[in-house]
Amino acid sequence: MKEWSSPVYAFFDPKPQISVINGQQAQGFKCSVRSCKVTMCQFLDTKDARSTGNMRKHVKICWGAEALAIADNAKDAKDVCSTITNKYL
């Protein structure tokens, strides 16, 4: 969790669900919007384990491109929480 510095993590629940999918350990990040049922998985044993590309695509769809653009200008996930997600939720 200490290595999650990308602002996109602020759009998802702070504690991921740890699970095993087809023998691979994964973290499941659930979108913070109450009506959204999407959970994004990051597999921990792959070379792109820290990739946030799919999370960014979901944020653009669910929260909007403007929210993602504002988050990109924030310094970290805590800043995004205070300026965007708390106001929206």
Image: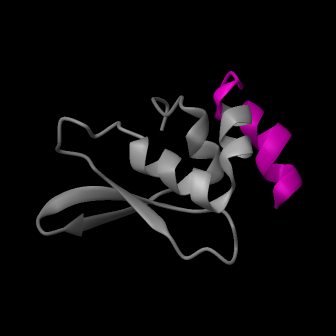
Q: Seen from this angle, which residue lies furthest left?
A: 23
Is residue 44 in view from this perspective? Answer: yes
Asked whether residue 83 is drawn in magenta, I would say: yes
50 to 56, vertically: above or below:
above
Question: Percent x, y for residue 4?
Answer: 49, 34
Does residue 35 appear left or right of residue 83 in this picture? left
Question: Percent x, y for residue 3?
Answer: 45, 29
Does residue 44 appear left or right of residue 82 in this picture? left
Question: Percent x, y for residue 62?
Answer: 63, 62
Is residue 13 in view from this perspective? Answer: no
> Which residue: 88% across, 52% down?
87
Q: Which residues are magenta?
A: 72-89
Does residue 80 appear left or right of residue 25 in this picture? right
Q: Quadrant of the C terminus?
A: bottom right
Does residue 40 appear left or right of residue 86 in this picture? left
Which residue is more in the foreground, 3 or 31? 31
Task: Using the rendered view, name the quadrant where residue 75 is placed.
Answer: top right
Question: Percent x, y for residue 25?
Answer: 22, 57
Q: Main secondary structure of the magenta part?
A: helix
> Which residue: 64% across, 51% down?
11
78 to 43, vertically: above or below:
above
63 to 39, vertically: above or below:
above
Model colouring: one colour
How many numbered marks appear? 0
> Which residue: 60% across, 51% down?
60
Asked whether residue 49 is drawn in magenta, I would say: no
